[in-house]
Amino acid sequence: MTGLSIDRQKKKHKQGQTKADSPPLNIKEKLALKKEERQKKQKLTGLIIFAICVAILLGLPLSLLFDPNIGAAVSLSLILGVFSFSYPRAALWAFIIYVPFTGTIIYWLGGNQILQLSKDIFYLPALIALVLECRKKRLPIIVPKQLGTTLLLIFVFCVVCLLAINLQRQFLPTCDSVAGMTMFRDGRLRGIPCRESETFLQGLLGFKVLLGYVPLIFCTYYLIKDKPTLLFFGRLLVTLVIICCVLGLMQYWMLKTGRCVGTRGYVADALFQATLEARCFVGGALAYSPEVNMIRLPGTFVSPWHWAWFLVSGAVICYASAFSETSQKWRLAALVGLTLVFINAVISGQRLAFFAVPMIVGLMTVITGQIANLKRFLPIIFAATLLIAIGFSLLNPDFVQQRYDSAVSRWQSSPPTAFIQEQLDFAIRNQGGILGRGLGVATASARVFGDISFVETYHSKVLFELGYIGFALYMIFMTHLVYLSFRIYRSLKDPTLRGFAGSYWVFLLFVAYIPYWYALDTDPVGVYYWIFAGVIFKLPVIEKQEKEAKILAGETATKSSKKGLKFKRKGVSLA
């Protein structure tokens, strides 16, 4: 009873009630509250002591025996892992903040391939902690439950593929060890089967890339508790988009003014290739060769492609807040963010960002029905147009025309449709059987464990790795996810919640079926996709909370008015 009373008091304080509105705590409740606060302090103190001990007992020997960077990295990883497990929701917020700056931090720390997984130090311990918490409280882990069947089918298929293909090939000898050897079979000489990579490790990484962030649906469902948390989530993402876009503009300015050389002075094909040696201020590989009108900026990410997809995601984030926020101040902030996204889409040099950002904004405007409220949003549209015009005039109109001409000429010389068809034909020609060729064998990040087949479009990659059956199961799962989120979006009545749901659903639809490049293998889309799905699935619960709060507020107001009227009548009768 005491714990319930404390929870009741906390909820009342969160709802903005004053002490005068709520009954005072009794002695037992006060003692229990003090005990809870004391336990929290003891827990934090214990974690700090543990962190110091780990840094000394583990980090120091590793630093002396191997390298100071190794010792520091291992110590920091363990410390962050323990804190993430102990404070899972704080860890998830840290994870969301860290994702847009992953590329910058990775290359500031030396660019080691293992650092690509650094964001999972926040994610995985938090996931485990939330699963244990939900099991203890008997809360559902698969949300929504309807998604469980299709998710289980693709999960089981991937596990079978991992064991039957990747693990089996791991026991083959390496190709270097059997070089030049042959065996006699069916009257013909054939080469001995061998492997050129660590196939099982590639499979594990491929499995993680394909389905590893799907549990973010579950994490986000329990992270977003109510409408204020949802608004905080949207505002945090808008703030991150603005910061990253400003850093992207600073990167362009440093290249243009010569503070960063870029790829100036390179020769032949090197003028047109993004390279880490040319990195500038933030992010990773870039190309900047003004002598041949070549520019590919990475922003805060590891490569220009990652930055292009961040700009597409940023357009969705800022659009959702610009049209659905309850605060005028944050609507204006989102509008500024959307303007910065448009400007960065032009100067990035990526035709994906150049064409996809206005395309997805147009889709959201039509599909979410905001075009019907055109008069209401005319001031916002006018302000956005004015800001974009000012930004482009500062950039120089000739530059904007150059970027447009460059994007169009690249489209004409290398049509995306032909490229997609070529990739699909390659995946069909190289089918490896009913289970495909194995997880990770076409996943770019799995190159760290050996050679891969570089397939550059997402659906072709899934088809190449999992075969026809696996590809069908995966697309059924994705279609089911999009369908369930659409039903929830259409069922919402609250305009704020419906606005967020509509924008995020368009993003889910766009990414699930666009065949160009491999967005779901790329930060931040591979993270934001599942987070946005988790937000959509939580919105009906939040809408129900809001309705109950309004009903409760109405009942309280009615009781107060009746009580005041009663006292007034008594006063009249006594007079």
Image (spheres, rainbow, N blue to C red):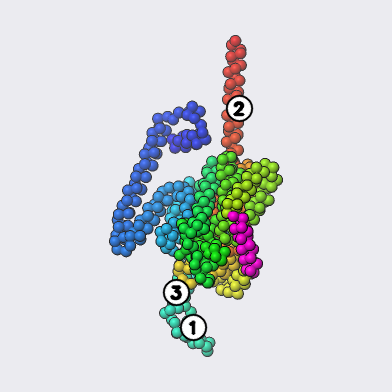
Measure how far apart labels 3 and 1 are at the Cα level.
17 Å
Residue linked to disc 1:
191
Q: What residue does disc 2 label?
A: 558
Q: How far is the residue under mark 3 from the one under mark 2?
A: 75 Å
Residue under circle 3? Answer: 171
Pointers 3 and 1 in contact (C-beta within 8 Å): no
- Which region is colored magenta? 396-418
Q: Secondary structure at mark 3?
A: loop
Relative side of 502 to 285, left or right: right
The amino acid on which the numbered mark 3 sits, given as a three-letter code, is Phe
In this rendered view, identify the residue nearer to me: 198 or 118. 118
Q: Nearer the viewer, residue 368 or 385?
A: 385
Identify the element where label 2 is drawn. Answer: helix
Q: Earlier in the sequence, mark 2 or mark 1?
A: 1
Q: CA distance from mark 2 to mark 1?
A: 86 Å
Residue at position x 46%, y 71% from top?
A: 450
User: Residue 63 in magenta?
Assistant: no
Numbered label attached to residue 60: none
Local crowd at mark 1 within 10 Å, few (<14), some, or many (≥20)?
some
Residue 509 point in image, percent of width and height? 62, 56
Of 82 and 163, nearer the camera is 82
**Nearer mark to the viewer, of 2 and 1:** 1
Amino acid tagged 2: Thr
Res. 255 visible in picture: yes
Q: Quadrant of residue 456?
A: bottom right
Which residue lies at the image location 54% right of the left edge and 54% below the top edge? 528
Left or right of 77? Residue 225 is: right
Q: Nearer the viewer, mark 3 or mark 1?
A: 1
Residue at 38% x, 35% y is 34
